[in-house]
C-alpha cells in the first residue's frame, strides 16, 4: 500500500495527542489574577497527576505566590508558560464568566467554551527550584471579608500597615501612618479558628497587600469564605484562601525597622 492510500483512521492515529484539561472560566480568571500579582510577564504552570500548580516570586523578591488546584490533572507532567494579562484580556473579550472551558496545551494554548474559542502564545517555561519558606508563625488570624475590605480601604491611603496581637486574645490591632492619615489605630475582629501563641507585631507594605487582597475579595464575593493570615514579629505574612478545589497562598516580606 502506497503512502497515498493510508486511510483516515490511520492518519488520526499518527497525529500527536494534544493534552487538555477542563476548568471553569471564573476559576481560570482567579488563577490568572492571582498570578499577575507577582508575575508581569511569562508565568510557568505545571499540570500532573496531583493537579495544576504555580509557584513564583516577584522581581523584587518581596512577594511570593503559590497555588494548587487538585480537581484537574494529567497522567504525564506538562509544563507551560503564558502571560496572565493576555489570558485575562481574552477572557474579558469572550465574556464567559460562568462557562466551562477546555484548555488544549499544544504548540499554542487553545481555550474554548460556550461556542467561543481563542488562543494565546505558549512561552518557554522557566526553571523552578525555589525553596518553600519554612516559618514558625506566632499568630494566626481568620478574617471575614468585611474586615479584609477595611484593611484594603485603609491600605489605599497609607504606605505601610502594622498588625499586632496579644497572646490568647483573638482580636488584633491595626495601625498605620501616611500623608493623608497621620496616625490610625483600631482593634479589629478575628473569627473563630484564630490562634495567638505569643505577642506579635509586624509591618507590611500596603502596596503589595492591596495587590493581593482584591483577588481574594473578587474570588470569594458572596461565598462566605474567610482569609487566613499568619505572621510573626519581623517575619513574612502568609495569606491563604480556599475556593472549591483551588488553594491560593500569598507571602509578603516584612518591613524591618531598626
Image: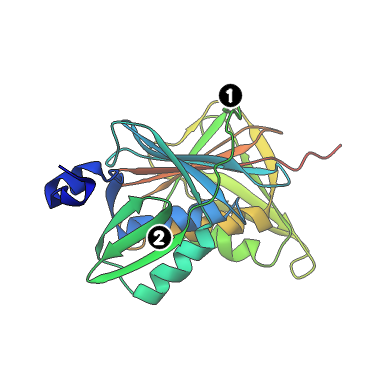
Q: Is residue 114 left or right of residue 164?
A: left
Looking at the image, is 129 positioned above or below residue 101?
above
Out of 214 and 72, give the one closest to the viewer: 72
Out of 108 and 70, give the one closest to the viewer: 108
Name the disc covering residue 29, or none.
2
Q: Is residue 145 left or right of residue 163?
A: left
Which residue is at 71% across, 33% downward?
Answer: 234
Q: Image quadrant of residue 49? A: top left
**Tag 2: Cα neighbours inside 10 Å, few (<14), some, or many (≥20)?**
some
Residue 239 x, y percent position in the rendering: 51, 43
Name the disc covering residue 134, or none.
1
Residue 53 x, y percent position in the rendering: 43, 39
Find numbered disc 1 in the image and state the secondary structure of the residue it sits on: loop
Residue 52 x, y percent position in the rendering: 38, 40
Extreme front residue here?
A: 2
Mark yes or no: residue 42 visible.
yes
Which residue is at 37% across, 67% downward?
Answer: 118
Mark yes or no: residue 145 visible.
no
Q: Image quadrant of residue 134? A: top right
Which mark is first along the chain, 1 or 2? Answer: 2
Which quadrant holds the C terminus? top right
Out of 16 and 106, give the one closest to the viewer: 16
Which quadrant holds the N terminus? top left
**Tag 1: Cα neighbours inside 10 Å, few (<14), some, or many (≥20)?**
few
Q: Are marks 2 and 1 in contact (CB under 8 Å)?
A: no
Real-space Cα distance between discs 2 and 1? 29 Å
Which residue is at 32% across, 54% downward?
Answer: 103
Extreme right residue here?
A: 258
Which residue is at 44% across, 36% downward?
Answer: 194
Residue 113 x, y percent position in the rendering: 25, 65
Find numbered disc 2 in the image and state the secondary structure of the residue it sits on: helix
Amino acid at each position: 500500500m502506497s503512502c497515498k492510500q493510508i486511510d483516515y483512521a490511520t492518519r488520526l492515529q499518527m497525529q500527536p495527542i494534544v493534552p487538555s484539561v477542563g476548568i471553569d472560566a471564573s476559576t481560570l480568571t482567579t488563577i490568572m489574577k492571582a498570578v499577575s500579582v507577582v508575575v508581569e510577564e511569562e508565568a510557568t504552570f505545571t499540570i500532573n497527576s496531583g493537579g495544576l500548580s504555580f509557584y513564583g516570586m516577584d522581581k523584587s523578591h518581596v512577594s511570593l505566590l503559590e497555588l494548587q488546584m487538585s480537581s484537574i490533572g494529567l497522567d504525564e507532567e506538562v509544563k507551560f508558560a503564558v502571560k496572565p494579562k493576555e489570558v485575562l484580556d481574552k477572557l474579558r473579550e469572550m465574556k464567559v464568566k460562568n462557562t466551562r472551558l477546555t484548555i488544549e496545551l499544544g504548540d499554542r494554548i487553545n481555550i474554548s467554551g460556550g461556542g467561543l474559542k481563542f488562543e494565546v502564545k505558549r512561552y518557554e517555561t522557566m526553571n523552578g527550584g525555589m525553596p518553600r519558606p519554612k516559618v514558625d508563625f506566632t499568630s494566626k488570624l481568620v478574617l471575614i471579608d468585611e474586615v479584609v475590605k477595611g484593611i484594603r480601604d485603609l491600605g489605599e491611603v497609607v504606605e505601610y500597615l502594622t498588625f499586632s496581637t496579644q497572646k490568647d486574645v483573638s482580636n488584633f490591632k491595626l495601625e498605620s501612618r501616611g500623608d493623608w492619615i497621620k496616625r490610625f489605630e483600631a482593634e479589629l475582629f478575628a473569627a473563630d479558628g484564630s490562634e495567638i501563641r505569643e505577642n506579635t507585631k509586624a509591618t507590611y507594605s500596603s502596596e503589595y497587600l492591596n495587590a493581593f487582597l482584591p483577588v481574594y475579595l473578587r474570588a470569594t464575593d458572596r461565598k462566605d469564605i474567610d482569609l487566613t493570615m499568619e505572621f510573626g514579629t519581623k517575619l513574612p505574612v502568609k495569606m491563604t484562601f480556599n475556593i472549591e478545589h483551588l488553594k491560593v497562598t500569598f507571602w509578603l516580606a516584612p518591613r524591618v525597622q531598626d
